[in-house]
Amino acid sequence: MDIERQFEGYRQAALAAIAAAQTPQELEAVRVEFLGKKRGRLKELQGLIAKVSPEQRPTVGKLFNEVRTQVEAALRRRKAALEQPRRAAEGIDVTLPGRVPALGRRHPLTQTMDEFKDIMGRLGFDVAYGPEIEDEYHNFVALNIQEDHPARDPLDNFYLATARTQTAERDRTAVLLRSQTSTVQIRVMERQPPPVRIVSLGRVYRPDTVDRTHHWMFHQMEGLMVDVDVTMAQLKTVLRLFATAFLGQDVAIRFRPSFFPFTEPSVEVDMWFDGDWLEIGGAGMVDPNVLTAVGYDPERVSGFAFGLGVERFCMQRYGIGDIRWFTENDVRFLRQF
Ligand code: DAH
């Protein structure tokens, strides 16, 4: 039948034109040509239906609707495809999701120390800083550590290979990587009169044999409070509040008598945590010799000081089994924090 051939011709022409359209504008022109309400080619075909015999009309009408539905659907699909962002010339699909950049994060020890500063800040302690390369005066002499004290043994310290003189200047010229953050106590008290209430956090260095719990570089938090009538009871309370704030439960603090040249009396500090006593550092009442060395009057002021190992706390909290992991830079470890 002639009219059926005309429909078929229309169908093929319309589908080919739709497929060939490369832009939404071109496609719109195709739409107007083939489906336009006023002068479109579909309109012409519709006119033909009126001319067939009444018996043929239902068949022809059905065919007409089929063709129209198919062409309209093809047009909708092509329109959606053309409105998508287009592929770049090199064949890069710009519609793919982007690559998420790998974000870094703060080292677990940095996070721990930041939290220490927060907790101690709430207890009224400022943060003080001191150099990692120290002279013997600040690392030993002012801290009442005598010349013959074993802690000054060159084999137990990282002395730097500077010219070593034997003159009175030696205290100030022989330098080493600090072996303790207690050096910062001296630096702070030299700078300011009492009262003092500071913590200082940072690296210390000792030529230890490395194993699961020892390293030649580790971190300490030093604390110092000097004022009139500072007592050991206050020291114990501060340490208990600190440990409780960090570990999130009521931990007990125990003092064991000990000796440090810069404190009198001196204690080792243990913490009751998870069913065990754990050694967390040293502490005591600042020795009068130290107060005198920085020009404070030991008759008028007293103070307490403490030094805690940062790695200990961090390992305890996160269940880290080996101190070496902190410095191996293995992202599988670091990503967990
Ligand atoms: N500096 C000591 C150490 O590294 C720790 C220490 C003990 C610090 C007693 C103190 C203190 O401030 O009072 O082993």
Image: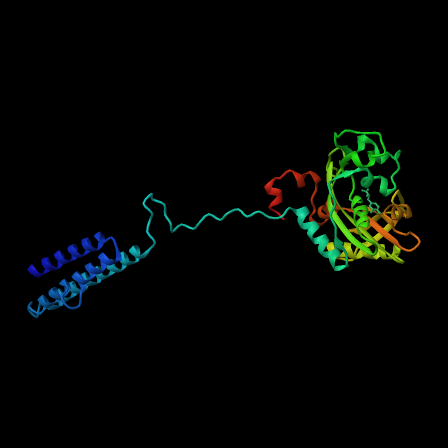
| Rendered-image quadrant of the N terminus | bottom left
Which sits in the foreground, 123 or 245?
Answer: 123
Which sits in the foreground, 284 or 240?
Answer: 284
Q: Identify which residue is drawn at 27% across, 60% down.
A: 76
Q: Where residue 333 sits in the image (x, y, percent)?
A: 62, 43
Q: Where residue 51 sits in the image (x, y, percent)?
A: 6, 68
Q: Identify which residue is drawn at 91% across, 51% down.
A: 298
Say how the picture is coloured: rainbow
Residue 8: image quadrant is: bottom left
Q: Identify which residue is drawn at 74% across, 59% down.
A: 122
Please indicate whether residue 320 sits to the left or right of residue 307 in the image: left
Q: Where residue 113 sits in the image (x, y, percent)?
A: 70, 50
Q: Identify which residue is drawn at 30% across, 55% down.
A: 81
Give the vertical position of 300 relative to 216 (above or below): below
Whereabouts is ligand 1, in terms of quadrant? top right
Q: Farthest residue in the right direction?
A: 299
Residue 92: image quadrant is: top left
Is residue 99 something one can see in this rendering? Answer: yes
Is residue 1 something one can see in this rendering? Answer: no
Q: Where residue 42 sits in the image (x, y, percent)?
A: 15, 64
Q: Exactly how many numbered labels are in the figure?
A: 0
Give the vertical position of 135 relative to 38 (above or below): above
